[in-house]
Image (cartoon, rainbow, N blue to C red):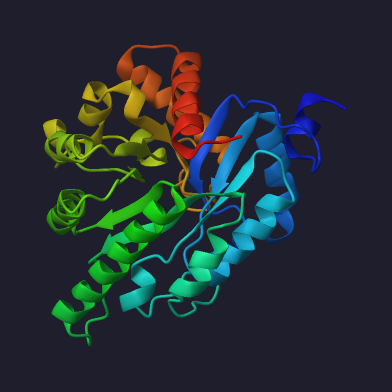
Amino acid sequence: MDRERILQTPGRTAVKPKLIDSHCHLHFPAYGDGLSAVLERMQASEVAAITVGTTAKTSQAGIAFAQQHQNIYATVGHHPEHLTSSFEDEYEGADDPFDFDELKDLAADPKVVSIGETGLDFFRIDPDRNRQEAEQLQEDVFRKHIALAEEVDKPMTIHCREAGDRFISIIADEKKRGRRIRGVMHCYTGDWEEAQKLLDLGLYISFTGIVTFGVKKSSDPEKHVHRVIERMPLDRMMIETDAPWLAPEPHRGEQNEPAYVEYVARKIAELRGMECEEIANITTENAIRFFNLQ
């Protein structure tokens, strides 16, 4: 049996991948009949993936999916937008209520390598809701995820949108209370000033295909995420696709998939003046260590 088949065959010893997509939603219904082809391209590219849960239902489905494949792992969590927004993405499927007890039970599965997707999303709050109460609800649930991650001794997969200051204050407060917090800020697009604060809190930072997009003429180039990539320590960096969303150049506008994580590695290598293989090796080792991948 060849290397590519071994990567995805149940019961076989997993081969160390060339690249790890540290955050995707491979088990979501977005891929439909095209899933087999997506997996084949992933195998051919020697990519491993962590497929991320966003509710109890999608977390359970992610575990079941990961159990069927080598070099695919799962997370369990409840995305903050599902707490305070009625928005439903066609790629994700129907929403379900927050169920902490179910998430806690799911977190014990050996295929689960992280707690999340969790965090804050102050962009996704319905206009008819009391905003203060909605923000507090997201914070309360985020703190529950932090406690769960410490209890089961697994890191967190973190989302933050339009809530940077509140997020940093929560992490700082939880650390002051004695919590051991290990987390990766996924899909980072902020500036170096904010990135420094996240790094000072001990977090990792992960980048998506957004880094392959050109800098807008109206933007301050010193505030661009490219400056973060150029400056941050390589031992705290990971790469991802956030598939099926955020396809990189040259596939921008198409449905994203784990094989495209190589384009993220290529762009980071370009920005750092390094070979793509070096970035692939570093980010793969970082993900293996961070998620304790076996």
Residue situated furthest top in the rendering: 274
Vertically, is 55 above or below 223?
Answer: below
Asked if one can make out residue 95 in the rendered structure from this viewpoint, the answer is yes
Residue at image coords 32%, 37%? 205
Which quarter shows the C terminus?
Answer: top right
**Residue 57 x/y as whole percent:** 56, 71
**Residue 280 x/y as whole percent:** 49, 22
Residue at image coords 39%, 50%? 156
**Residue 34 x/y as whole percent:** 71, 53
Residue at image coords 35%, 52%? 158
Tally the marks: 0
Asked if one can make out residue 251 in the rendered structure from this viewpoint, the answer is no
Residue at image coords 59%, 24%? 18
Which quarter shows the N terminus?
Answer: top right
Q: Nearer the viewer, residue 287 or 211?
A: 287
Residue situated furthest bottom in the rendering: 128
Vertically, is 57 above or below 187?
Answer: below
Taking the image as shown, residue 293 lies to the left or right of residue 189, namely right
Taking the image as shown, residue 267 lies to the left or right of residue 84, namely right
Taking the image as shown, residue 175 lies to the left or right of residue 112, namely left
For residue 143, what is the image quadrant? bottom left
Vertically, is 137 above or below 213?
Answer: below
For residue 2, what is the image quadrant? top right
Q: Nearer the viewer, residue 224 or 21?
A: 21
Taking the image as shown, residue 153 lies to the left or right of residue 229, namely right
